[in-house]
Image (tube, rainbow, N blue to C red):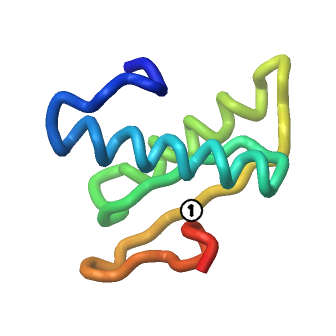
Amino acid sequence: MNKGSNPKNSNEFIEQQLNGRAVAMGEAFDSDILSFYGPLIGGVDDHIRGVIEDMRKGPHRRTLTVVVSHTPGTYLPFMFGR
């Protein structure tokens, strides 16, 4: 999806907003961003660990900021500059 494209539905709009905020966080922290929302069940933590390890092996390694949240009905105010 193009960054500047008009969303075709609410899912695309939300995806664009989340991607934009992840980019802003990456710039603010001068790091790569990995975000996960959901329960850590059924090997999900192993998958996340694998992704992190793969990122660390890459040629363009940077500091990694990880945000894991499982707090339904709330938001992380620091992500939105409030």
Looking at this view, is 11 or 50 the one in front?
11
Please tell me which residue lies in front, 6 or 79: 6
Q: Nearer the viewer, residue 20 or 56?
A: 20
Rendered location of residue 11, percent (x, y): 20, 41
Packing grade of label 1 (10 A; few <14, some 14-19, many >=20) is few
Q: Looking at the picture, how far across and down is residue 21, in whole percent? A: 55, 52
Quadrant including the N terminus: top left
Q: Which residue is mark 1?
A: 67
Percent position of residue 82, x then y: 59, 80
Q: Is residue 72 above or below residue 10?
A: below
User: Is 42 in front, or is 51?
Assistant: 51
Q: Which residue lies at the image location 56% right of the left edge and 36% below the top edge?
A: 51
Q: Position of residue 56 (x, y in %)?
A: 77, 34
Residue at image location 63% in from the left, 72% down from the top: 81
Q: Residue at x 84, y 23 (%)?
A: 60
Residue drawn at the location 75% of the way across and 48% of the way down? 64
Q: Element under label 1?
A: strand
User: Is 81 situated above or below 67?
Assistant: below
- Which residue in the rendered view is the most extreme toward the left? 9
29 horizontally vs 10: left or right: right
Say whether residue 13 is left or right of residue 64: left
- Is 26 placed left or right of 73 in the picture? right
- Kind of residue at badge 1: Val
Query: What count of labels does the image hold?
Result: 1
Query: As drawn, is 48 to the left or to the right of 17?
Result: right
